[in-house]
Amino acid sequence: MKEWVGRMQAHELSQRFEWLDRLLAQSRQWWQVRPFHHRDYCWAQIHPDLCQALDALEEAELHRLQGDIAAASRWLSPWLEGVEELQRLSVLPRLTARQLSPPERLDHGIPGRKWQQILAFAGCIGNGSGPLLEWCAGKGHLGRLISSVQRRPVTSLEWQAQLCRKGEALADRRGVSMRFVHCDAFSEQAGQWVRRGEHAVALHACGDLHTTLMRHWRANQGASLTISPCCYHVIRTDDFVPMSQAGEVARVKLAREDLHLPLQETVTAGAGVRRLRERELHWRMAFDELQRELRGQDRYLPVPNVRKGLLKEGFPAFASWAAARKRLDLLGEVDEEKWLALGWQRLQRVRRMELVTHVFRRPLELWLVLDRALYLQEGGARVQLGEFCDREITPRNILITAER
């Protein structure tokens, strides 16, 4: 779709939102599901041929398709109408970023991939000399880079006092013009720091943290806004509420759980972390089989987050911990071999169901981002969307820029 390659005009934001909304609503049966809740394919009765094709996938081919959404969409297109068009609609232009020359060792103590994200994000911020607000700043790594390169004053708002103190020490060491404000971003006082005519930035502020900044910026007549949304599910309400007028009348209606889907892609974890995550999923599926027998109910039972050290103590220890959390009696020794075998079968089926749901991750994320962009546009801002870095650096690589 060639018309989406360059910078989108105002009417194109709303048009793309409408197209995405229509296609996502038509295909909700494929993505508005919870694969790990089910023992069988969610679509077994209506699409048995797809289920057979998924079962026939060799592990190597499944792994290849999981890592190549375009190929997965082509493979699934005989069954999923409109899936390839959704992928085309999800393509965003790569923003032109300036190559920055930060002072030597400014990246000291910052993980390499995180530093790459900061560099790419900062490179998309135009030169300026006026005050800049860094929202949810942490230790102020982003603000310190911007202040160092652009020689502009930065106010870094952060709710953890310890991070403020560490950020102040780092800024003093570098001699940059930074002020740290110890403040809860959700407090009434936070809005006073989003000032008329100034620039505000937020790199990966989670959920309601970045939408709160957007509301303050629009209400307070900020001049420029640069944000990269993250963790859409981190909201303070039980139900998702769209920000824009277009979102309010959209066909797609989202539950809070739906907001997890765009985040089900990680490219930054090391091999050890990935193996531990795979083990946890395997054991959770094994325990789910066990708890269904114990309770005599063929229904999924959510288990809370687990201490990672427990994953090194064996499945019986994990099962005992999970049973205690759910107040279940294991009725004797756990048959590890039996339940792990059943859990492995469940995990393989979940992986194949996720191959279907995951081709909708980026389209749904862009639907959410466009809802935010249209909210800013409805408030009188000029808005641009694009990718500020490669997905290998972070899958959360969408940038929203707004100007008065």
Image (cartoon, rainbow, N blue to C red):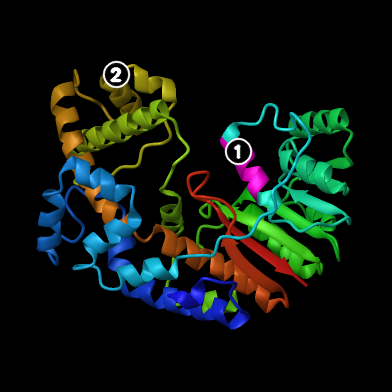
Task: Check if mark 1's residue and mark 2's residue have beta carbons within 8 Å.
Answer: no
**The one of 53 and 209 positioned closer to us in this rendering:** 53
Q: Mark 1 points at which residue?
A: 114
Q: Where residue 87 appears, x then y in whole percent?
A: 38, 66
Mark nearer the viewer, 1 or 2: 1
The amino acid beneath tag 1 is Lys
Judged left or right of residue 241, residue 280 is: left
Magenta: main secondary structure: helix
> Residue at (28%, 63%) from the top-left corner?
30
Q: Name the residue under label 2.
A: 314
Instruction: Inspect this view and state whether residue 251 appears.
Output: no
Q: Where residue 96 appears, x then y in whole percent?
A: 64, 59
> Residue at (70%, 67%) from the top-left corner?
402
Compared with residue 216, is residue 235 higher up or lower down, i.e. above or below? above
Residue interval drawn in magenta: 113-120
Packing grade of label 1 (10 A; few <14, some 14-19, many >=20) is some
**The one of 273 and 107 positioned closer to us in this rendering:** 107
Q: What element carries label 2?
A: loop
Question: For residue 22, what is the image quadrant?
Answer: bottom left
Packing grade of label 2 (10 A; few <14, some 14-19, many >=20) is few
The amino acid beneath tag 2 is Gly
Judged left or right of residue 111, residue 214 is: right
Compared with residue 3, is residue 336 higher up or lower down, i.e. above or below? above
**The one of 73 and 17 positioned closer to us in this rendering:** 73
Of pointers 1 and 2, the one earlier in the residue sequence = 1
Q: Where residue 108 appears, x then y in whole percent?
A: 70, 27
Instruction: Inspect this view and state whether residue 30 appears.
Output: yes
